[in-house]
Image (cartoon, coloured by chain):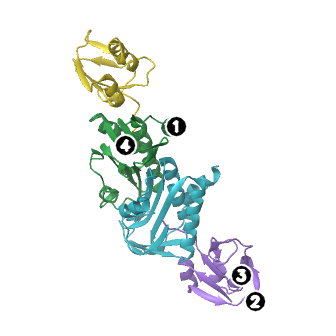
Chain colours: A green, B cyan, C yellow, D purple
Amino acid sequence: MPVRIQTEDFEAGREIANLRRDNAAVGAIASFIGVVRDLNDGAKVAGMTLEHYPGMTEKSIAGIIEQAKERWNIHDALVVHRVGELKPLDQIVLVAVTGAHRGEAFSACEFIMDYLKTHAPFWKKEQTPGGSRWVEARESDDVAVQRWQSKA
Amino acid sequence: MPVRIQTEDFEAGREIANLRRDNAAVGAIASFIGVVRDLNDGAKVAGMTLEHYPGMTEKSIAGIIEQAKERWNIHDALVVHRVGELKPLDQIVLVAVTGAHRGEAFSACEFIMDYLKTHAPFWKKEQTPGGSRWVEARESDDVAVQRWQSKA
Amino acid sequence: MITILYFASLRENLGRGAEQIALPTGTCDLKSLRALLRARGAAWGQAMADGSRVRAAVNQDLAGDDAAIKDGDEIAFFPPVTGG
Amino acid sequence: MITILYFASLRENLGRGAEQIALPTGTCDLKSLRALLRARGAAWGQAMADGSRVRAAVNQDLAGDDAAIKDGDEIAFFPPVTGG
């Protein structure tokens, strides 16, 4: 199953090893880990709560992975995303992509992350000294995803 | 030490955890693992020997990491590269980059890998059914590295 | 009956995470469902305003104003996403 | 004396990984060192030909034909790299 939404932490090394296991056609593994920072938009962050839309979140990410597979010659992709209560230094998301060559693995991995950020239904609520606040969507994320739409 | 050349295998998860440890300003970790494939240029590969130039290899990779740090706003980077006897499915290289945001971490990680492939003194000799052969440098790797030279 | 789900700040502002309503006309589109909800006034007026940044999904696919809605559908409203 | 190192296929073709030689003139450049080695004939002629793809480093930095060489330097010759 290439998409997992869970409250538990993950071990990136083990996930990557499972993804490529016994496939000697894999020459390249690109991966990304997103982590909770202790500072966001100028405020100290003590922790955050991640909410999602069960069902649609998995479907949406599976669709993003399918798009990446149509677009690049990659073998496999995995997304693990945590929900619930998280604090600074906690891992949030892992995206890993295996392929024969590095260029396509890198592109597919960044594509999946950019689409996840803008299309997958997750919402972050941060705890700061000024109280709780819902994180605002970033324009820079919209810009990042538009790059992929202008390329052939 | 951001560059290690070693015969032993590495654990990507542990290396990444060490690289970001206790730094709550890190929000993004991009990483790449290169793996020995069992097929290259149309021939079955039973194993390979990786030779390097002790001293220059470390110096060259450290210089590539410095270039990446001048070019992008990243926190840290790590390169672990194996030498000696390797067989299909063995890990060859790990590049990991930490930063506040994903775009810069992705770019720096791919930049380091592209320069390592074309500038760091390593040579692969493959064992195939037709005997041993030195791997030829790929034009696609030169093309990959030239991309970075045309960007501002 | 259709099921409507609300997420994140929208869920908090509207004071509910889910509800079931009967479609007055049997079928409609997202635009007219928004109008129906907007007519509840107060927080609903703002959340369902035509120019609001609230997104919608029909049966778990992102959908625009002209998306058709029929009995049994699952509709969701939520703010722009911020995961990852 | 300078130290010269040879790597990978070059090391195999030339039958040596390292040697020390005295510079005839005290200093020179990479181009004239190549000419000196080329004059050994056989495999050396091919490996050190002007049009060959063999790369060179002086004191562990990649260097071109006009790079200066002086006593005590470490020079290396090797084929295009293929790591990673």
Do the CB atoms of the residues marked 1 and 3 lie less than 8 Å apart? Answer: no
Q: Is residue A15 or residue C4 the one in the foreground?
A: C4
Regarding mark 3 in the picture, which secondary structure is present there? helix
Q: Residue at x 39, y 48 (%)?
A: A36
Q: Which residue is drawn at 45% across and 67% down?
A: B80
Q: Can residue D1 be seen in this view?
A: yes
Regarding mark 2 in the picture, which secondary structure is present there? loop
Residue located farthest toward the right when viewing the structure as drawn: D25
Q: Which amino acid does label 4 sit on?
A: Ile
Q: Are marks 2 and 3 on the same chain?
A: yes
Label ID, residue A143: 1
Mark 4 → mark 2, Cα distance in angstroms: 64 Å
Label ID, residue D33: 3
Q: Mark 2 points at which residue?
A: D24
Give the class, few, some or many, for how many residues have Cα within 10 Å of label 1's Cα (few <14, many ≥20). few
Q: Where is residue D39 in the image (x, y as percent from the top left)?
A: 71, 85
Mark 2 → mark 1, Cα distance in angstroms: 62 Å
Do the CB atoms of the residues marked 1 and 4 lie less than 8 Å apart? Answer: no
Mark 1 → mark 4, Cα distance in angstroms: 20 Å
Q: Mark 4 points at which residue?
A: A65
Residue located farthest toward the front when viewing the structure as drawn: A129
Do the CB atoms of the residues marked 2 and 3 lie less than 8 Å apart? Answer: no
Regarding mark 4 in the picture, which secondary structure is present there? helix
Q: In which quarter of the image is the N terminus of chain D?
A: bottom right
Q: What residue type is labelled 2?
A: Pro
